[in-house]
Amino acid sequence: MNNIIKKISETIRTTTQIDPDLFQTYNVKRGLRNEDHTGVVVGLTKVGDVVGYERDEDGSLKAIPGKLIYRGINIEDIVKGAQEENRLGFEETIFLILAGYLPAKEELKDFSQLLSQTMDLNPKITMHILDLEGSDIMNILSRCVLELYTFDENADDTSEENLVRQSLNLIATFPTIIAYAYNALRHNQGKSLHIRHPKVNLSLAENFLYMMKGNKYTPLEVKILDLALMVHADHGGGNNSTFAVRVTSSTGTDTYSSIAAGIGSLKGPLHGGANLRVVDMLKHIKKNIKDWTDVEEVDAFLQKILNKQAYNKTGLIYGIGHAIYTISDPRATLLKEMARDLAIEKGREDEFNFYNLLEERAIKNFMEYKGSNVKKQVCANVDFYSGFVYDMIGLPQEIYTPLFAMARIVGWTAHRIEELNFKERRIIRPAYKNASDIKSYIPLNERT
Ligand SMILES: CC(=O)SCCNC(=O)CCNC(=O)[C@H](O)C(C)(C)COP(=O)(O)OP(=O)(O)OC[C@H]1O[C@@H](n2cnc3c(N)ncnc32)[C@H](O)[C@@H]1OP(=O)(O)O
Ligand SMILES: O=C([O-])CC(=O)C(=O)O
């Protein structure tokens, strides 16, 4: 390694350390979190709500089953509404989150048509995707979004109408960009290249499967993907990627720059990137234990992970834990039901049972490991079962996190519009307390 890099890296090991007691001394909320793990309130939103606990009269927290609300309506009711009428629900969810109300029949029809008509890409963008090097589709997505800036004649205009136009364009083109990027990746690995134009009048979910796999997809796969997109579409203003979009939007920057910030955040393994880690971690556990059904063996391995002795040695069990949810994440519950039904249909019950066992044992082992040191109740989060569901409908790992982005672009754009249109808005600019000593400047020839 280059000597300068080595030396600076060694210095960083000490210069980045800050006495943890100082956080208490100066009442600094580490990770914008209060002592009881709840988030510091930094804004107000009408887009979505995430509920994982209630406060008792004495101010203490009471864990409750998780609730996710889009524009005042519970996600479980939105999902049930679409299922009972035997129709897809992602387009309706997009309309609800962006517009703030449920669309009437004709309105939904026109809106769905507008989206499917907007899915096709400018051929220059398609060529650009084919030309991009790299194998990480989140990275490619981000680069494409920044490239779209140059194709937008009105890129910097933050008027309501322009923001809505840009938002719908991004929501409609994300599936196309992701499917083309994946097909280009396969081509680079020696497979045939298929670039299919999206079809007008197909839903986003159906068009995505069509662009990924041609006509080799089933109505059940469409239904499942549609549902997965619905439950990933928004998660309030405080999740890391939406907050990144809100922070950057508050400077008045363009839509493409702020959405690129959201993509960068979502890619991280503690956020949307966890869906990929879960699958990888499960493979690792399966490979390293003899019997998938042996509770003692599973427990022993989970303890090794928590002790930073196994898997990627971070001490984290991916897909477990959440900043807000305590007893349950309603999206994980919905995805788990789906995973169970699909596993039965596909003859993969053994794998489902392994996921189920790991979920149960991970929660138990986490509680035992942390003991009374942490007043935190954990549950499986949305990322725990999503990869398994995607795998069962024939979708490849490379697009697990991009699929999250394909849904969350809805929440990002709705929050950006809210951030920019709030009349009393201010640039988001919190404070950092200085924790370094004051030193004198030393002239160059006097330094050792
Ligand atoms: C779509 C989404 O973003 S959902 C989340 C996806 N991410 C994951 O699944 C990654 C694994 N989970 C985690 O890392 C965390 O649970 C997060 C990032 C989701 C939430 O983190 P936080 O709210 O900051 O957790 P919090 O600080 O309250 O946790 C308390 C302690 O439990 C630990 N902890 C939390 N989750 C886990 C876990 N899955 N495995 C091991 N330890 C954990 C924390 O490291 C922390 O330990 P410390 O006190 O020694 O520092
Ligand atoms: O809310 C969070 O912190 C993370 C999350 O589950 C999401 O963004 O979907």
Image: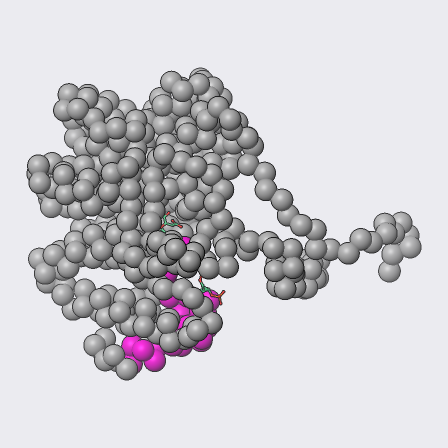
Q: What residue is at 15 percent from the left and 21 percent from the top?
A: 106
Q: For residue 21, which quarter of the picture?
A: bottom right
* The image quarter in which residue 389 lies: bottom left
Residue 330's place in the image compared with 145, above or below, is: below
Q: Residue furthest right?
A: 446
* Residue found 21% across the figure and 32% down from its top: 92
Q: How many marks?
A: 0
| Left or right relative to 422: residue 333 | left
x and y, in percent, of residue 64 in the image: 30, 57
Residue 282 visible here? yes
Point 80% across, 53% down: residue: 438
Q: Which residues are magenta?
A: 297-323
Q: Quadrant of the C terminus?
A: bottom right
The quadrant in which the N terminus is found is bottom right
309 in the magenta segment: yes
The image quadrant where one finds ligand 1 is: bottom left
Residue 336: image location, x then y, percent: 20, 57
**Relative to the observer, which residue lies in front, 230 or 399?**
230
Can residue 391 be found in the magenta stretch? Answer: no
User: Which percent across, then down, holds residue 324?
Assistant: 38, 53
